Amino acid sequence: NDPEIEVYTDGSYKDDKGRGPRTGAGIWYGNEDPRNRAIRIPGEDQSNQVGEMAAILYLLDEVSPYAPLKINTDSMYVIDSLTEYMEEWERNGFVRIKNAELIKAIIAKLRERGAETKFRWIKGHSGVHGNEMADILAGEGADKPTPDGIDLTIKEKFNLAGAQLSTMTQALAYQAILERKVRPNRHGTKEVLDITRHATKEAFGFTPNDERIWKSTTNKDVRRPIRIFLWKTLHRAYKIGKYWENIPGWEQREKCQVCGEEESMQHILLECEEPCRKMIWNLAEDLWKMKRDQWPELKNIGSILACTMAIFKDAKGKRMAGANRFYRILITESAHLIWRLRNKRFNEASIETWPEEQETRNQRIAAINQRLDLDKAMTSTRFEKKAIPRKLVLQTWRNTLRNEKNLPEDWTNVRGVLVGIEKQR
């Protein structure tokens, strides 16, 4: 009989500014053991949990299937996924389960083994030498210049496809259908995703994958109509610009009514010479500078779409929840208003009926004050789980209010609180 092999595994996730998210896996057999490995995980899905799981998969690929195996890990996520939850997830076809392909590959490898495999949980960073060494190796893996390969293939006889109908609910079945029908991104969508990815890295120091970008469009700080606007903008789903190029009789719609340039969402939001567009962004900049000294430059459409992933930090490197939230609200509301004004111009036959700059400015300030009132109201406990924490609302609007020094520390129940920029008469 082969002797038992005892191994320590760990994962590491790093999101350093300039390098983007990187995940490593560490496998430690013993001091100066040539089998010790530091691995960098490939692909878009980067997280500490991915690193912990991947370490198990790499290990199972390397050890003899006939040797008893004892795996020491500080991850209950790994242990629970491969023991307690495994049967239920298999019955449900791994619907809604993160890292499903990775977990399924590990389960198949475990079933291939002809010897016992044991998992042992150990407390992380508690002085256990093997765990500390695996952690170091995982960190080294994340720092490697190029990712290693990973094999997710499953032998046919160990591949349990589909779900058990007797346990399948309607909701799970619907989700399974959606997951199977996922289509690759169109070229235009991929281009906007890449622009957004680079803009996020430049502005906030990390590189989001596609999933994170899509998820950011559903941020709860953003009103539902604006979430739809962001989603469609990412998809290039609006009928503007080149859409009209080859439609007989409608070719003139390809051009901007103000500039005569080809329309695109970037042109509409950031480049058009229309005065109201410029005024809205100037107003947003003035409000932001009441809170923070520097206004982030909006270079392209990606800069706007990246706002829902904003990360601003204080002098100590701590994330500023209030500033992040205020920026999300400010940028998305401003962009959506510019889009709505463009649509109003598009549908108006006469230039005389287009909105005037002063009127639009006053409407914008009124809308900001309405959002402030909504935030105040949403701190009420009657909204239960949907209530916004009072502290977060205070942080969001701090340094942006009129006569703020004369307001009480908690002004959420005070009537007549307004932003510090006044309407023009």
Image (cartoon, rainbow, N blue to C red):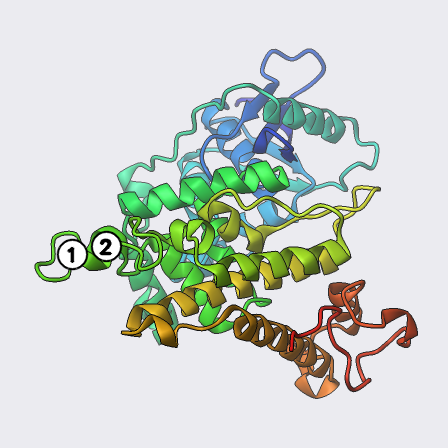
Q: 53 or 47, which is in the foreground?
A: 47
Q: Name which quarter of the figure residue 30 lies in.
A: top right
Who is closer to the viewer here, 75 or 156? 75
Q: Residues within 10 Å of mark 2 (few under 14, many from 20)?
A: many
Vertical side of 173 occupied by 37: above or below: above
- The image quarter in which residue 326 lies: bottom right
Residue lying furthest left: 248
How far apart marks 1 and 2 lie (CA) works out to 6 Å
Question: Which element carries disc 1, helix, strand or loop?
Answer: helix
Q: Position of residue 291 (x, y in %)?
A: 76, 57
| Residue that carries the numbered disc 2 in the rendered image | 254
Q: Which image quadrant: the C terminus?
A: bottom right
**Horizontal and vertical percent position of residue 178:** 31, 62
Where is 16 relative to 250, above or below?
above
| Relative depth, front residue between 20 and 227 | 227
What mark, if any, has residue 251 been given in the picture? 1
Q: Amino acid at mark 1?
A: Glu
| Left or right of 18 in this view: 100 | left
Depicted 80 relative to depicted 40: above or below: below
Say what secondary structure mark 2 lies in: helix
- Residue shown at the point (22%, 59%) measured from the top left: 253
Is any part of residue 85 visible from this angle?
A: no
